[in-house]
Amino acid sequence: MNESFPVSPPRAWAEVDLAALKHNLAVARKSSVADLMVVVKAGAYGHGLEEIARFLQAEDIAFFGVANVGEARRIRNAGVETPVYLLGATWHGEREEIVAREWTPCLSTLDEAAHFNALAATAGKRLKVHLAVDTGMGRGGFLLAEIPSIMPELEKWEHLEIDGIGSHLPSADEDEVFTKAQIATYHDILQSIGGESRFKWRHLLNSAGLLGYDRGLCNLARPGLMLYGVSPMPGHQSSLKNVMTLKSRVTLVRTLPAGHGVSYGRQFVTTRSTRVATIGIGYGDGYPRHVSGQGAEIWLNGTRCPILGRVTMDQIMADVSGAGEVQAGDEVEMFGANIPVDEVATKAGTISWEIFTGITPRVVRCYSGS
Ligand SMILES: *Cc1c(COP(=O)(O)O)cnc(C)c1O
């Protein structure tokens, strides 16, 4: 009966539409006119690292961007040979494997460079590395004042090949003036240390950068969120297709009399006779408890229904008085095409990135559209 599910009837599952992902990839390509590093850190933003990497491997992706060696390993173990780039600073325990498997790290210090060079020498290799430049993110990269003196130093290391130069935008979706100045700084730095021809890969733009700004001399963009269907820039949402739909089922429907409390803390008390559905999903699945009392809604029977009281670990309650005939077993959309994930994130006081990556392993991922 439930053969489309890898395990027997789940109460909470995430449907991932791979055709929509492919559509969003085409949008990213079209707006950036550059090669793409597809960011698949944190389990491809909760969409399933192996599944997404396998699906996209035939799409001529320049790199998969990951957070750590564990994620890089999972891509290789899935049989995917696309080059892998480590988005943040590496710590020394990760580096031997990075060299052995020829993943691409970015460098923020000469000490890192020296260590990679020594490891590459031992392995008898020349390792491709990228130079990270801190133009304002404050999380990694060489500081601007260091740049003029470091290039000659880096070029002394025979076992390193400086194959790219990257930087990161902290507020492309919030501060246009700062971002434009930052992009100009990146270009100044690039020009001052050899220009376009010196670096095979030049990259700066995340989703917001790619959607809102010109690529300039960059030839690689690093989109994450937009590929998963959410635009960080207002005005671009309609060009993207929804990829993940988080779903659950009604497990119980009752009519509670006026004056009846609902959920922990009894923060919500009915003011009239209310049709209340209990739904089999909670914060144990990654649906954020912080939406409690914030007016969050679910989608049921083609209608928005308000969540009542606090989100519990495994169950939530919703007022389905306006949703017509509702029965146990009915499907509910927690977020997706009808309830934007962005709306849930805002009600929870957070961002879509965190909602996606917070979906727990208990939620079965199901794929369609490949
Ligand atoms: C996560 C990340 C990205 C992708 O950001 P989105 O906003 O999801 O597009 C790009 N570059 C770096 C360095 C990152 O850490």
Image (cartoon, rainbow, N blue to C red):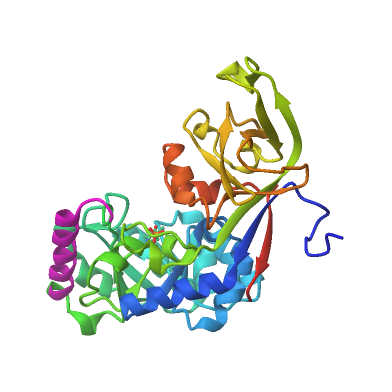
Characterize the magenta stretch by its predominant secondary structure: helix
> Considering the image in quadrants, where does the C terminus appear?
bottom right
> What residue sits 64% from the left and 42% below the top?
285
> Considering the image in quadrants, where does the N terminus appear?
bottom right
> What residue sits 22% from the left and 85% below the top?
197
Q: Nearer the viewer, residue 195 or 183?
A: 183
Residue 77 seen anywhere in this rendered image of the structure: yes
Residue 84 to residue 180: above or below: below
Percent across and percent down for residue 168 are 29, 60
> What residue sits 14% from the left and 75% below the top?
191
Residue 75 to residue 343: above or below: below
When asked about the image quadrant of residue 18, the answer is bottom right
Q: Is residue 5 left or right of residue 236?
A: right
When asked about the image quadrant of residue 121, the answer is bottom left
Q: Nearer the viewer, residue 176 or 182?
A: 176
Percent across and percent down for residue 159 are 38, 76
Magenta-tinted stretch: 173-191
> What residue sits 62% from the left and 14% below the top?
259
Residue farthest toward the right in the current orientation of the protein = 1
How many marks do you count on the picture?
A: 0
Residue 114 seen anywhere in this rendered image of the structure: no
Q: Nearer the viewer, residue 253 or 58?
A: 253
Percent across and percent down for residue 229 are 47, 63
Q: Is residue 275 left or right of residue 62?
A: right
Residue 111, magenta (yes or no): no
When asked about the image quadrant of residue 284, the answer is top right
Q: Nearer the viewer, residue 56 or 73?
A: 56
